[in-house]
Image (tube, helix red, strand yellow):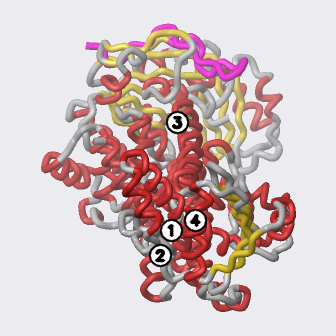
Amino acid sequence: MTMILVFIKEIKQNLRNVRAMAYLVLFPIILILVLGTALSGAFDQSTIKDIDIIYASPNDGPLAQAFKSFITKGGEMGFTFTEAQSVQEAQDRVTNGNYACFINVSDNEVEIYENDKEAFKANLVEGVLGSFIQRYKALSQIAVVNPVVASALIKDQSSHDFVKLSTPGDLRKPTAMDYYAVTMLTLIILYSSITGAHAIKDEKTAKTLPRLLCAPVKKYEVLTGKILGTLVITSLQVVVVILISKFLLKTYWGDHMLAILLLLASEVAMAVSLGMSVAFLFRNERGVLNFLIPLMAFFGGSYIQVNNFSKTMQLIANFSPVGWINRAIFSLIYSNDYSSVAKAISINLCLAAIFVVIVSFSFRKETV
Amino acid sequence: MKMIKVEGLIKKFGDNAAVDNISLEIEEGEIFGLLGPNGAGKSTIINILCGLLSRDRGKVEILGRDINKDPNAAKKNIGIVPQDIAIYDDLTAFENISFFAGLYGLKGNLLKNRVQETLEFVGLADKAKSRPSDFSGGMKRRLNIACAIAHRPKLIIMDEPTVGIDPQSRNHILQSVRKLNELGSTIIYTSHYMEEVEELCSRIAIIDHGKVIAEGTNEELKGIVTNINSVWIMVDSVSRVNADALRAIKGVVNVEIAEYLIKVDSSVDMNNLDKLILYFTENLIAIKSIETKTPNLESVFLTLTGRKLRD
C-alpha cells in the first residue's frame, strides 16, 4: 500500500513538473535535429556496397569447405574476398585500413579480426558470418545423425531453407540523424539520473522525509515506490522520444525494437539509481552528476563515434555503461547482432544493483 | 492510562548530551507543554518519540508499548506536526492530506471523508484543490497540521507550530489545538513562546541543556518564583539609569533595561520599593509609571537558569 501511494505521488509530481518533462523530451529531439543536420557530412553513406575482406583458410577440412559457400554468398552481397599470404600480413593490412576485417578459418573455429575504424562494416560481416556458422553447426549435427542427407545438403548450395541465413537485409550504415537518434536518447537517459536524485533530494528540501519516516511505513516500501515511479516516468519519456524520432524525424531503428527497449530500460534503471545514490552521498548532487554524465556520454560515443578514438581512449570507453548500450543498439539495428545485448544489459543492471544497495543502506541510516 | 512513559532517556551527539537522563509521564487527555530555549533538547525528545532518532539509553513507552520493540504500532497512534512546514508544493491540499493519511492505512471513502473533514477543521475546505505554492504562511501551517491529524491519532505532537505566522492564524491554530484535545487527543506542545504554553497546557516541563529543570502545572511552576517580586518602572529616558547601581540595592536579584522600561526583580521578603524610587528621584530620572507584575513562566525560567527563554 505504501509503495503504491509513493509510486502514484512520484508520478503525479513528475508529470506536474512540466519544465523538466519538456526538457527531457524536447532536448534530445532538438539535439538529434541539430547534430544530425550539422554533422551529416561525417556520415556520408547510407548503404554499404563494397566491403573488402581478407581471409586465410589454409586447410581443406569440412569447415574450410563450408566457408567457401560463405565466400559465394558474400560475393553476391557485395563483399570482396582476398586470400591472405600470412596471418601477420593480413592483420597488419586490417590495422592499416586496407580491409574491413580478417577472417581466419582453422580446422575447428573461425576467428575474425576487425578494424575499429570500419566497425559498422566489420559488424555487418560478423553478422553474416554468424549466420553462416550457425548453418554449419546445423549441418554438422545432421551429419552425425544422417551423413547422406548432410552431404546432399552441402552439395546443394541453393538449399538454405533448413537454416535461414539471416543477413542485414538492406546493408545500412547510420546517417548522422540515425546515429544521433540513438546516442542522444541514451545521453538524455543519463540525465534522468537528475530525476532520480530529485526524488530523494526534494523530500529533504521540502522537509517531508522526516514526516514520511514518522508514519508506520517500511523504508524499503518508500524507496521502492520512489524508484518505480521515477523509472516509469523516465521510460515514458524514452518512448515518446523514440516515437517522435522514428515517425517524425524518420530515423532508422531496425527490426529489434523490443531488445532495444530492454537495453534502454536497463540504462534507465542504472541512471535513476545512480542519481539516487549520488543524492544520498553528496550534498552537491547536481555538480557531481553534471561532471559524471558528460564523461560517460563522451566515452560512450554520444558526441563522436568511439571508432575515431585512440586505442587508450577506446580502452577507457569500456568503462562507460552508456557505451555498451550504444554499441549493442547499433549492432542490433545494423548487424542483427544480439551478441552484445546481454552483456550491455548485465553491465547496466549490475551497476543499478550496486547503486540500489548504496541507496538502501543510506536510506536505512537516514534520520532527521 | 499513561500515554507516554519516558525513563532515564539519554541521547548524545558526540560528547554533547542533547537529552540527559530525562524521565517524563504524560497522561491521556493532557496538553503537555515542553518549554525551553532553542537547542534545549525539545526537538530531540520529539524525534525519539516519533522513532526518527534512536536513543542511547532509557525506555520510551507509548500507550504501554516500547517504541523500540514495536515502532509501527506506536507510530500508528501518533500524528506529528513538524516545526518546518512539511508538505508537497506540487500536490493540492487534498492530495497532501490524502497522501499522508494513506500512509496510516486509510483508504477509499473513509479516506476521502476524513480528508474533507480535516480540511474543514483547519479552515481550508475551499482550498482543497489549490496547491500550497499559492498559500499564505498561515495557511501552509494549517495544512501542515491537517496532514498530521486526518488519521485521528491518539497522540499529536506539535513542534513549534506557530513559528513565523500572523496573529490571526496563530489564534486559529491555538483554537484547533484546544478542539483536538476536546475531541480526545493527547497533545504534546513544544514552543519557546511561553505565553502559548502558559495559555494552552495543563502540565509543563521546562527543558534546559537536555534536562527537565522543572515540571508541573502552570500554577505549580509559578509557585517556584513566589519569592520574587517583579516591578516594571517606565521612565522618560533610560540613558542615565545605571543597572549596577540598581543591582546594589538590597534585595534586587535581577535588572533588565529596555527602551523606556526598567524591569527589577527583588526578593519578596525585602520591601525595597522605596529605595528603588529614591534611586530615580536622586538621579533626577522622571518616573512615568510603576507596575507590579505577577510571576510568569519567563520569570520561572529566569529564576531557575539565570537566563531568559529567548537568550
Q: Position of residue A290 (x, y in %)?
A: 70, 61
Number of other residues with Cα within 10 Å of mark 2, as a class: few under 14, some 14 to 19, many 20 or more: some
Cα distance between the residues tagged 1 and 3: 38 Å
Q: Say whether disc 1 or disc 3 marks the residue closer to the N-terminus.
A: 1
Residue that carries the numbered disc 2 in the rendered image: A254
Name the quarter where the N terminus of chain B is drawn.
Answer: top left
Query: Hey, what amino acid is under mark 3?
Result: Ser
Number of other residues with Cα within 10 Å of mark 1, as a class: few under 14, some 14 to 19, many 20 or more: many
Query: Hey, what amino acid is under mark 2?
Result: Gly
Query: Hey, what amino acid is under mark 1?
Result: Asn
Quarter of the view holding residue B274: top right
User: Depth check: A358 or B238 in front?
Assistant: A358
- Bounds of the magenta segment: B1-22
- Count the numbered circles shown: 4
Residue that carries the numbered disc 1 in the rendered image: A336
Q: Say whether disc 2 or disc 3 marks the residue closer to the N-terminus.
A: 2
User: Same chain for the residues at labels 1 and 4, yes or no?
Assistant: yes
Q: Nearer the viewer, mark 1 or mark 2?
A: 1
Chain for disc number 1 = A
Is B35 one of the magenta-colored residues? no
Q: Say whether disc 1 or disc 2 marks the residue closer to the N-terminus.
A: 2
Query: Hey, what amino acid is under mark 4?
Result: Leu
Q: Is residue A29 above or below residue B227?
A: below
Q: Nearer the viewer, mark 1 or mark 4?
A: 4
Residue that carries the numbered disc 3 in the rendered image: A360
Number of other residues with Cα within 10 Å of mark 4, as a class: few under 14, some 14 to 19, many 20 or more: many
Residue that carries the numbered disc 4 in the rendered image: A129
